[in-house]
Image: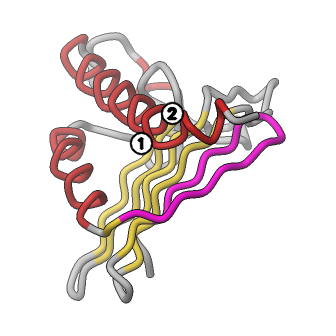
Amino acid sequence: MYNSIVVTNPISCKNKTIKYKFTLVFDKINWKTNASLKLYDAEYIVILEGDLFSKVIGYINPLFELPFDPNGKVYDGPELKIRLTDTNSYTQWSNMTNLQCEYDKAFRIPDLYVNQENQNIYTNVIKMLIKLSDDLFKDQINQE
């Protein structure tokens, strides 16, 4: 297994087009962080030191305390999927549209599970990840 963080633009059951996809994958064997960014049809890749992934996980750690639905989208905004494996554990956290469009919408009852504080934590994590992608790929994007 591998450790990964994937951020995509908001997706709906009607519009399934991915226009933005930022991916961080941690290569445990070589202690590297592979980052890729897909903007429409262009794709950019950079390989960085492994401790970057650890720093990102440290920053987004509050996210793991938030309630989530592994089969559907709970929080507004861009979508996020995280997979972490260790020798003895596996952690998955996601906020992705269920493209079968059949999930139970009870989770979306205002303030029952998602209060404004939880939404703010999610929004801040997404903003940090998007800023990270901007910082990592600004030179490559500006060359085109």
Is 92 on the left or on the right of 134, as rendered? left
Front position in the image: 61 or 116? 61
What is the number of callouts on the image?
A: 2
Seen in the picture, residue 5 relative to 59 is either above or below; the reply is below
Is-magenta flag for residue 43? yes
Quarter of the image where the N terminus is located: bottom left
Label 1, label 2: how far apart the Cα atoms are: 7 Å
Categorize mark 1 by other alpha carbons within 10 Å: few (<14), some (14-19), many (20+). Answer: some
Amino acid on which disc 1 is placed: Asp
Which mark, by number, is residue 86? none
On the rendered image, what quadrant is the C terminus found in? top right
Magenta segment range? 34-48
Of 64 and 67, nearer the camera is 64
Which residue occupies 38% across, 73% down? 32
On residue 73, the disc is 2
Q: Secondary structure at mark 2?
A: loop
| Mark 2 surroundings within 10 Å by alpha-carbon count, few (fewer than 14), some (14 through 19), many (20 or more) | many
Image coordinates of residue 11 in percent, x first then y, are: 67, 29
Question: What percent of the width, then of the height, locates residue 38?
Answer: 68, 44
Q: Residue at x 27, y 38 (%)?
A: 67
Image quarter of residue 102: top right
Q: Nearer the viewer, residue 97 or 20?
A: 20
Q: Are marks 1 and 2 in contact (CB under 8 Å)?
A: yes
Q: Give the SS element for disc 1.
A: loop
- Residue type at mark 2: give it: Lys
> Label 1, on which residue?
69
Residue 47 or 71: which is nearer the viewer?
47
Residue drawn at (43%, 76%) of the image? 2
Relative to 132, is 36 above or below? below
Residue 78, horizontal then vertical, whole percent: 52, 27
